[in-house]
Image (tube, grey):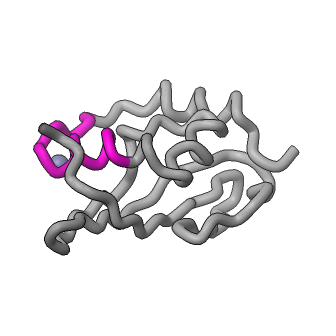
Amino acid sequence: MPIDEMKTAAYYEALQVDVCDCLYCRNFYEAVNETELGAFLQRWGVHMNQPRHLSHFDEEPMHRYIGEYVLIGDMPLEQTTALTFERHGEYIIAQFDLVVPWVLA
Ligand SMILES: [Zn+2]
């Protein structure tokens, strides 16, 4: 099995992290859902508001975000241009570099 959707979803449900609710992070959580990357990761049970090491860079009028999500499984089914995969034992670290607009009102 490539990505284990059940295990990945369970990983996020068990995560005891505070979801950052600053404006920059909230913009990311909203904007990422509109992207191919968001659709790809959500399909595998990833909670989009729980990235690791999320960084924001202002690139007026756009906003660049860098960070990573954890997936569980063997190998990703497909690569996407915005993602780089790295294996760490049972975990797959999916690093992203994504430029999105400001979507919050
Ligand atoms: Zn934040």
Q: Is residue 96 above or below residue 70?
A: below
Residue 59 in which image quadrant: bottom left
Seen at 26% across and 36% down, the residue is 19
- Viewer-proximal residue, 101 or 26? 101
Range of the magenta residues?
Answer: 18-31
Q: Residue drawn at (31%, 63%), measured in percent from left and top? A: 65
Task: Using the image as rendered, state which of residue 56 and residue 92 is in the foreground.
Answer: 56
Side of 89 relative to 53 (left or right): right
Q: Main secondary structure of the magenta part?
A: helix
- Residue situated furthest right in the rendering: 1
Picture coordinates of residue 26, whole percent (x, y)? 22, 41
At 45% from the left and 59% from the top, the residue drawn is 68
**Does residue 48 belong to the magenta stretch?**
no
Identify the residue shown where x is 50% and y is 46%. Answer: 38
For the N terminus, the quadrant is top right
Residue 95: image location, x then y, percent: 50, 65
Instruction: Please provide percent x and percent y for residue 101.
Output: 26, 57
Q: How many marks?
A: 0
- Image quarter hosting the C terminus: top left
Where in the figure is residue 88, as x and y percent of width and height? 64, 63
Q: Nearer the viewer, residue 19 or 14?
A: 19
**Would residue 25 be counted in the magenta stretch?**
yes
Lateral position of residue 1 relative to residue 4, left or right:
right
Left or right: 59, with 86 as reference point:
left
